[in-house]
Image (spheres, grey):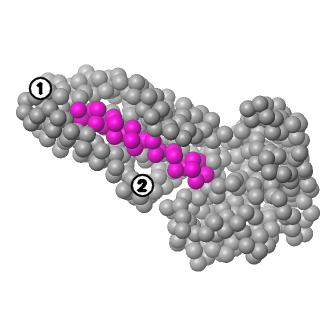
Amino acid sequence: MERTGIFRAACLAYRRDLLLAFRHWGQVVQPLVFFVIVATLFPLALGPQLAELREIAGGTLWVAALLASLLGVELLFRADHADGTLEQILLSGQPLAILVVAKGFAHWTVCGLPLVLLAPLVATSLGAPTAANCTVMLSLALGTGILSALGAIGSALTLGLRRGSLLLGLLVLPLAMPSLIFGARAIDLAIHGDSARGPLLLLSAMLVLSVTLAPPAVAAALRISAE
Amino acid sequence: MQPYNCSGLSASGIEFWRGDRRVLADVSLEVGASECLHLLGPNGSGKTTLLRVITGLLSPEQGQVAWGGRNTRSDCDGWRADISYLGHSDGLKPELTARENLVFETSLRRRLQDGEVDAALEQVGLAAARDLPSGILSAGQRRRLAMARVMLAAVPLWMLDEPYTNLDAGGSTLVAGVIGRHLDAGGAAIIAAHQALAIPGHTPRRLELA
């Protein structure tokens, strides 16, 4: 009997989560719609002057993306915990941290990636020049990755709690602040025609840091939540 | 079915507290190849807790569990690759079909041969439901499906928590037969159940929890 290797197990977990996302895509689209709605609230509240909107475009995009990803990440482990499949994954004899990476990447594929692809549209509606689109997407691609990793820790920690969503926000939002500062700054610089290299490199470093440190933390939190 | 190389489980002096209530007090047990241990006791006596402590999902305050003479804590993933656990919840994804559930859960552990999953589905009487989402199956059918997952894992030690829940008379006989064949092949099983197990050809040892 041939045991399943780590890489194959991770691919399986990734494929399964994508399949599950497609089976209930209504739930998957919700954070995306939320992102668009929150970003549209700002022009409505502040007035339609493009020059003014352009000044706040970076911050608006990032705050909207932050809240949307918080909404999505809450569901990352909840269903698995409720139907007992999390228990089976824990007992599968595969290293949990690797499966967590696969699950997190699947989550980013269905929640983060569409948001990144939609971002130029929202940015344009906030008056950002098309030349800034590349930076907008890059900044949010790195950002949603960081937010998925941080959110996964919060989601795993608040798994067994009945009203975990508020606590999730309290746990994750402070940790997300540094990336918010540099991510919004990068877009701001690009909108004004400057090079956004510095903040983007810092964001990349943060992504590397959170993606390497989060999986063991998530795995430990899941083991506690499964007790 | 291939014969197992079952190395024997022994747990000694297990003590477990939940808050300020002692759920398990100095519980010891041993299970060897072709043996079945029947955990009995009233509701709340700690049968599920004991099973979860043995799997390692819960850590006991005292005592240890050894598999083939080695402490299970020292090689947690290796130990878990040798056991299959059926808990209170069936551990099935309602959105996936019966077949997809089995393929995923089993492939996570080992490489599947062609037709193995369909044969297992047939064995538990779910051949007609193989392409239905497990969410629309009845509670009894889901229990059968969960039992098929345990079978397909092809591991030496089964830990079953109330395997007969929601099963009809036919289903109970079927599950007892499946457990019997597992024991015939040299496997071992620890089963928490309120009713008699009625495993053909085997008399389970009983362990009463107070």
Q: Inspect the magenta stretch and tell me whether residue A69 lies in it.
A: yes
Disc 1 residue type (three-letter): His
Disc 2 residue type (three-letter): Ala
Judged from the image, the secondary structure of the residue bearing numbered disc 1 is: loop
In the image, what residue occupies the spot 41% across and 58% down? Answer: A24
* Residue B101: mark in rendering: none
- What residue does disc 1 label? A192
- Nearer to the camera, B122 or A59: A59
Which part of the image, by quadrant, shows the C terminus of chain B? top right
Magenta: predominant secondary structure element? helix
The chain ID associated with circle 1 is A
Other residues around mark 1 within 10 Å, as few (<14) / some (14–19) / many (≥20): some
* Residue A21: mark in rendering: 2
Which part of the image, by quadrant, shows the N terminus of chain B? bottom right
In the rendered image, the vertical position of residue A68 relative to residue B207, given as above or below: above
Q: Is residue B100 visible?
A: no
Q: Inspect the magenta stretch and tell me whether residue A144 lies in it.
A: no
Q: Position of residue A17 (x, y in %)?
A: 47, 52
In the image, what residue occupies the spot 63% across and 48% down? Answer: A87
The quadrant where residue A226 appears: top right
- Which mark sits nearer the N-terminus, 2 or 1? 2
> In the displayed image of the protein, which residue is found farthest to the bottom?
B128
The quadrant where residue B195 appears: bottom right
Q: Position of residue A13 (x, y in %)?
A: 51, 50
In the image, what residue occupies the spot 42% across and 60% down? Answer: A23
Badge 2 and badge 1 both on one subunit: yes
Which stretch appears magenta? A60-86
The chain ID associated with circle 2 is A
Residue A43 relative to residue A18: left or right: left
